[in-house]
Image (cartoon, rainbow, N blue to C red):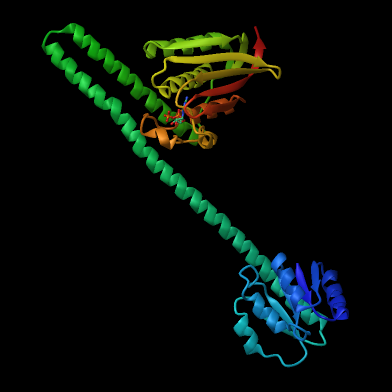
């Protein structure tokens, strides 16, 4: 928008007409004071400023504008009859573009100048926008790079932990073989197997992340019965977690169209987290149901440490770990991100409800493909 400032309404009228006929949007002010008020409130691409006005004259308006950070770059075309002191103006108004048109105004010359300034204004706006986008992009990449670096250090540490245990158990096994104690050897080898499984799971998660990144996470989808899959996941957790109770409520005799192995992975992840983040408690509750809009609803509830309200939104993001507890629990912050990706790719949804210190309920939904 262009602002015309002139104390004579007839001048404003004719200038406004010329500009509007050339498709410029125009605003007007009858005095320097009114112009300043408008400049503070609105964004203008150009100001056409009469020099000789009663009260504040054009030069004084320009000088005042030069002090507004928001407006100091708006170009000005002065309309002057006489007495144009260029040096004075340029001193007060150095950063914006300046030009003069002498009165009586030649419409063609004025239009030519307006068009040039307007083009410059548009180019500047475009450049500023590109600059802002680039700045955001740089910030985003820096942040991603930082997270990746942190992740590499966490992942290396996570991989090293079971590896160190495996080495220790193998050394102990070797010693007990040497002592001829086959019972103890078997125990050490069993512990080695547990650590190997951990290592295997960690590497599988890392591979999943790289598959998600490269768009290569593939699904082998077919119709399957959900309840047997849920029971199998619960059994796996019972076998791998000593003395735990998983209390199952609800019914969902339904079929789902999806990749059984991947949906089981989601269940196991939710259940593993429920026990992992509930030190001292041995009970986790699973509830299954169906909703009127044909969705299977699965909820996994624990009475564990919970998640602070402000941290819940990021919980399914890549590499996200709740800072306050990250030093107490090992983890890479990728399990829930993989779950979210699996559920998204099955047209499912995922949610968390949690209260710090009281526990969490992680749930997900999946479209039902058939009722048994
Ligand atoms: P990891 O457990 O390896 O850190 P996840 O992606 O599975 O990674 O979980 C991300 C973060 O979410 C965890 O670091 C933890 O802070 C939080 N979290 C996940 N499940 C629970 C839960 N049941 N209770 C409390 N916090 C949880």
Please name the residue shown 53% across and 10% down the image. Answer: 248
Residue 342 figure quarter: top right
Question: In the shown orientation, is residue 153 left or right of residue 186?
Answer: right
Q: Is residue 335 above or below residue 372?
A: below
- Report x, y in % for residue 200: 36, 23
Quadrant placement of the C terminus: top right
Q: How many marks?
A: 0
Please name the residue shown 15% across and 8% down the image. Answer: 181
Question: In the shown orientation, is residue 276 left or right of residue 50?
Answer: left
Question: In the shown orientation, is residue 354 left or right of residue 324?
Answer: right
Q: Is residue 286 above or below residue 9?
A: above
Residue 280 figure quarter: top left
Task: Judge by depth and name the residue closer to the eye, 202 or 33.
Answer: 33
- Report x, y in % for residue 257: 61, 17
Q: Residue furthest front?
A: 357
Q: Quadrant of ligand 1?
A: top left
Residue 347 figure quarter: top right
Question: In the shown orientation, is residue 11 left or right of residue 134?
Answer: right
- Report x, y in % for residue 44: 72, 68
Q: Can you see residue 131? A: yes
- Report x, y in % for residue 82: 75, 92
Q: Can you see residue 258? A: no
Please name the residue shown 56% across and 22% down the image. Answer: 363
Q: Residue furthest bottom?
A: 83
Q: Is residue 282 above or below residue 133?
A: above
Task: Judge by depth and name the residue closer to the eye, 67 or 86.
Answer: 67
Please name the residue shown 18% across and 15% down the image. Answer: 173
Quadrant placement of the N terminus: bottom right
């Amino acid at each position: 928008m262009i602002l015309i400032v002139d104390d004579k309404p007839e001048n404003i009228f004719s200038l406004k007409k010329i500009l509007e006929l050339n498709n410029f949007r125009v605003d007007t002010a009858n005095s320097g004071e009114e112009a300043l008020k408008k400049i503070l409130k609105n964004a203008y691409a150009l100001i056409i400023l009469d020099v000789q006005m009663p009260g504040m004259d054009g030069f004084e308006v320009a000088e005042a504008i030069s002090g507004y950070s928001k407006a100091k770059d708006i170009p000005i075309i002065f309309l002057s009859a006489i007495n144009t002191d260029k040096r004075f103006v340029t001193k007060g108004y150095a950063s914006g573009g300046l030009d003069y048109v002498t009165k009586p105004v030649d419409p063609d010359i004025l239009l030519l100048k307006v068009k040039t300034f307007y083009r410059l204004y548009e180019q500047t706006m475009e450049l500023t926008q590109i600059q802002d986008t680039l700045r955001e992009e740089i910030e985003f990449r820096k942040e991603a790079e930082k997270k990746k670096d942190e992740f590499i250090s966490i992942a290396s540490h996570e991989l090293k932990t079971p590896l160190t245990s495996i080495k220790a158990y193998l050394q102990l096994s070797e010693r007990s073989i040497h002592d001829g104690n086959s019972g103890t050897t078997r125990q050490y080898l069993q512990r080695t197997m547990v650590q190997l499984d951990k290592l295997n799971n960690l590497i599988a998660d890392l591979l999943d992340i790289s598959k998600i990144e490269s768009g290569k996470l593939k699904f082998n989808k077919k119709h399957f019965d959900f309840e047997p899959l849920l029971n199998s996941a619960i059994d796996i957790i019972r076998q791998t977690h000593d003395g735990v109770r998983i209390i199952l409520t609800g019914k969902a005799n339904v079929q789902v169209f999806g990749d059984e192995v991947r949906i089981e992975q989601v269940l196991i992840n939710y259940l593993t987290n429920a026990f992992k983040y509930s030190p001292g408690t041995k009970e986790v509750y699973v509830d299954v149901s169906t909703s009127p809009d044909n969705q299977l609803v699965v909820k996994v509830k624990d009475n564990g440490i919970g998640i602070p309200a402000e941290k819940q939104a990021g919980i399914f993001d890549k590499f996200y770990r709740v800072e306050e507890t990250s030093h107490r629990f090992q983890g890479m912050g990728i399990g829930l991100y993989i779950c979210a990706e699996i559920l998204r790719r099955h047209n499912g949804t995922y949610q968390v409800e949690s209260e710090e210190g009281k526990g969490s309920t992680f749930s997900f939904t999946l479209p039902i493909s058939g009722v048994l």
